[in-house]
Image (cartoon, coloured by chain):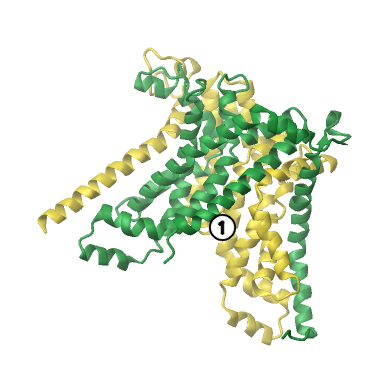
């Protein structure tokens, strides 16, 4: 039985008017700044950009054929995935261990926490410049201290690892803060009971901390996977346009930026970004499926 | 019992050692950035012998030189204005929308909130080309308005504030309603002041995001005198990448304000990130 539609009382009507007045700026803004752009980007991906970015002509799937048949696209996608395969696991595992230590009520934890979080408040542009200098083959600190001669950022075989290391360094503190707040929600009785049963540090970590923390871990992994797949600033700042390792490190978003804004080919750029978004949505979908199996639901 | 105590102590020592090594690794880039910034270029590129510390005086004047050469005053001003207006706009629009979604009943609420949630799931790169074209046709390229443009409203902030408002008790608002306060008065005088911590979280998040962003300022503010710190650094690196002390001094100048603010408001930063959990 459906309820008969009630007529709104004067009070409810008044409340609705206020509510709409309150949400109108946000909703209008979202439509103009976000939802229209999605449609416009998709539309442009079917267009060829004229000179000076004007005079779009409809070309159907031509851009998609060009993007998908260009080896550069797939190579960049693979570069992006390789970066994510370094940043996400290392960034998450190191942060988790540090968070567990800092949650132990040791002396001086606040100092450590402050230090680990420091990279989070630095602009990636500056971070990349410093690391580039650390990595410098001839004058860099790393090679000179370790007495090695590694071309950290111009050897195509290792440049992506070097960028991954910067990524891990940058993101540890952020992951750690989220882990600490997740850890504080685990009731202390679990650990007390485990201690009485004789389970010590490492055992407690595997049997209590890891499963009970898994919702937090999943959340962090999910945000970091998306963050890593949209990497731009670190890579852009570290790799010069003349770097021989550029081909092996350029990410999808870098490719998008280059085509859409450096070369002014908005149609092609729009197609790359649609491709990226579809890819990210697929990854998100797979992760959501995996969530049911991997995350501990008490 | 003795051995249990001893193994606890050993565990503690191991933890401290690991924490200290990690802290050291985290600090090395900062220390090296500062040490390089006060060297002469000749010293910075001497490898045989390789000096950690400056050998002939600490050249603090490098900072003054970089400040003047690259017009840091303008970069600071642009960055500050962008952050100020983005935080203002985000807090204003999000607190209003968050209140409506969190506390009021109205037709269309579910659909409108769905829009907010959907926006949060879409990677922001897909918005950029049309946003750029809009800024360009408004004539806002190379202006602060152009820098602020994509951050006028925030789906994430709306969501954050909605959660904040939902957590408040009903009693206060009902008492105020009985006293004859209308919705606007209830919002302004009673509910909004109670969500201060959510607002601070959103403000910190917005400021950090704007401060760190590189692509948007590079796209809309291509002129050196209109751009932000991040994009300014990118420009400098492209032009003068071989004077290392100058580059490092510029990097120090670009990161130092946020580090100082972070150290002063540490608690708010950490709590803000922990509670918002937003993607930076």
Q: Position of residue B238 (x, y in %)?
A: 63, 23
Q: Is residue A65 above or below residue A152?
A: below
Instruction: Kindly identify the residue that appears in the image at 35 percent across and 57 percent down.
Output: A209
Res A6 quadrant in image: bottom right
Give SS at disc 1.
helix
Res A180 quadrant in image: bottom left
Position of B63 compared to B104: left or right?
A: left
The answer, for residue B91, to whether it is visible in the render is: no
Locate the N terminus of chain A and report the quarter of the image it occupies.
bottom right
Q: Which chain's colour is yellow? A: B
Q: Nearer the viewer, residue B74 or A139?
A: A139
Locate the C terminus of chain A and report the quarter of the image it occupies.
bottom left
Position of B32 compared to A74: left or right?
A: left
Q: Position of residue B212 (x, y in %)?
A: 59, 41
Instruction: Kindly identify the residue that appears in the image at 49 percent across and 25 percent down.
Output: A133
Position of A219 compared to B56: left or right?
A: right
Instruction: Kindly identify the residue that appears in the image at 74 percent across and 55 percent down.
Output: A30
Palette colour of chain A: green
* Residue placed furthest toward the top: B48
Q: Position of residue B192 (x, y in %)?
A: 63, 69
Q: Position of residue B21 (x, y in %)?
A: 33, 38
Q: Which residue is mark 1?
A: B201
Q: Residues within 10 Å of mark 1 (few under 14, many from 20)?
A: many
Q: Chain of mark 1?
A: B
Res B186 quadrant in image: bottom right
The answer, for residue B159, to whether it is visible in the render is: yes
Instruction: Kindly identify the residue that appears in the image at 43 percent across and 59 percent down.
Output: A182
Q: Nearer the viewer, residue A224 or A20?
A: A224
């Amino acid at each position: 039985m459906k309820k008969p539609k009630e007529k709104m009382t004067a009070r409810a009507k008044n409340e609705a008017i206020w509510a709409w007045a309150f949400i109108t700026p946000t909703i209008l803004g979202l439509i103009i700044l976000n939802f229209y752009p999605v449609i416009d980007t998709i539309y442009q991906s079917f267009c060829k950009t004229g000179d000076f970015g004007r005079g779009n002509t409809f070309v159907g799937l031509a851009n998609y054929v060009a993007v998908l048949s260009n080896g550069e696209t797939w190579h960049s996608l693979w570069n992006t995935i390789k970066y994510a395969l370094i940043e996400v696991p290392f960034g998450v595992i190191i942060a988790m261990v540090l968070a567990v230590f800092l949650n132990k009520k040791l002396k001086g934890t606040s100092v450590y926490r402050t230090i680990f979080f420091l990279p989070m408040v630095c602009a990636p542009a500056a971070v990349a410049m410093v690391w580039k200098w650390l990595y410098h083959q001839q004058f860099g600190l790393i090679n000179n201290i370790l007495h090695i001669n590694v071309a950290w950022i111009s050897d195509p075989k290792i440049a992506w690892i070097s960028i991954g290391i910067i990524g891990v360094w940058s993101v540890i503190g952020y992951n750690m803060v989220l882990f600490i707040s997740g850890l504080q929600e685990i009731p202390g009785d679990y650990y007390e009971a485990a201690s009485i049963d004789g389970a010590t540090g490492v055992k407690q970590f595997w049997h209590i901390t890891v499963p009970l923390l898994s919702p937090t871990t999943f959340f962090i992994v999910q945000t970091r996977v998306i963050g890593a797949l949209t990497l731009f600033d670190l890579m852009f700042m570290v790799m010069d346009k003349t770097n021989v390792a550029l081909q092996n490190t350029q990410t999808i978003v870098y490719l998008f930026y280059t085509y859409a804004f450096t070369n002014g080919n908005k149609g092609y750029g729009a197609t790359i970004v649609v491709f990226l978004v579809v890819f990210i949505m697929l990854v998100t979908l797979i992760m959501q499926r995996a969530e049911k199996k991997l995350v501990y639901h008490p | 019992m003795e051995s249990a105590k001893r193994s606890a102590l050993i565990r503690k020592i191991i933890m401290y050692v690991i924490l200290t090594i990690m802290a050291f690794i985290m600090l090395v880039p900062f220390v090296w950035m500062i040490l390089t910034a006060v060297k002469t270029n000749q010293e910075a590129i001497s490898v045989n012998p390789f000096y950690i510390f400056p050998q002939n005086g600490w050249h603090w004047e490098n900072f003054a030189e970089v400040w003047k050469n690259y017009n840091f005053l303008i970069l600071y001003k642009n960055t500050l204005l962008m952050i100020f207006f983005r935080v203002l706009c985000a807090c204003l629009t999000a607190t209003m929308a968050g209140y409506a979604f969190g506390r009021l009943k109205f037709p269309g609420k579910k659909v409108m909130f769905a829009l907010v949630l959907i926006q949060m799931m879409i990677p922001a790169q897909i918005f950029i080309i049309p946003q750029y074209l809009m800024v360009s046709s408004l004539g806002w390229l190379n202006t602060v308005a152009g820098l602020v443009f994509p951050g006028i409203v925030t789906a994430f902030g709306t969501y954050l504030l909605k959660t904040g408002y939902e957590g408040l008790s009903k009693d206060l608002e009902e008492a105020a309603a009985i006293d004859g306060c209308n919705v606007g008065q209830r919002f302004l005088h009673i509910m909004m002041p109670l969500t201060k911590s959510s607002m601070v979280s959103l403000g910190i998040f917005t400021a950090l995001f704007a401060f760190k962003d590189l692509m948007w300022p590079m796209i809309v503010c291509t002129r050196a005198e209109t751009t932000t710190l991040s994009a300014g650094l990118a420009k400098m690196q492209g032009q003068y990448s071989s004077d290392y002390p100058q580059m490092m001094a510029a990097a120090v100048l670009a990161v130092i304000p946020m580090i100082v603010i972070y150290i002063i408001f540490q608690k708010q930063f950490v709590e803000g990130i922990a509670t918002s959990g937003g993607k930076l």
